Image: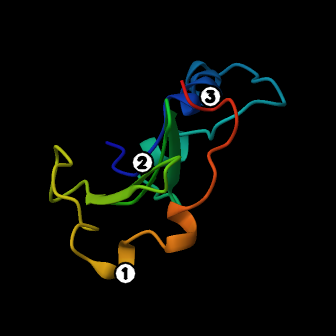
Amino acid sequence: MVTDPVAMIDARPTLPGIADVTAPKRQCGQVLLPLIQGERAPDPVVPSFYKEHVTQRHVTYRLIRDLDAWQQIVDTEEDFWQLRDLCQNNPAFLPSEAQRNMPRAAGLRG
């Protein structure tokens, strides 16, 4: 069982290794066979993008940010449904005045 964060993009480079066929030289993602065989990823960070949100998952934490500098950090191990924001009421995670006043990128708002 793989417990490190992985992404769907990792399926394409992994399948040729499972099927024992030659893979294309250039492709995105990582081969998951070492993880399937019990090795650990050296520094597993998985980015994902959805509408105006960008997330990064690193081991058990997920950072969620949007274009308005709003951010949320959740512990995916302790909070499976990701309902408890670790940034809430924590001044270290509040966006700076500069971030709040940044102009929005043209054409990125739906």
Taking the image as drawn, is residue 63 in sight?
A: yes
Q: Residue at x 56, y 61 (%)?
A: 101
From mark 2 to mark 3, how far is it between C-alphas? Answer: 20 Å
Q: Amino acid at mark 1?
A: Ala
Between disc 1 and disc 3, whose residue precedes?
Answer: 3
Taking the image as drawn, is residue 62 in sight?
A: no
Is 28 left or right of 6, judged from the image as shown?
right
Is 94 left or right of 109, judged from the image as shown?
left
Q: Residue at x 53, y 40 (%)?
A: 32
Q: Is residue 94 above or below residue 17?
A: below
- What percent of the width, then of the height, locates residue 15? 58, 22
Q: Give the quadrant of residue 1.
A: top left
Q: Amino acid at mark 3?
A: Gly
Nearer the observer, 32 or 48: 48
Q: Which mark is residue 17?
A: 3
Q: Is residue 86 above or below residue 57?
A: below
Q: Which mark is residue 92?
A: 1
Q: Amino acid at mark 2?
A: Pro
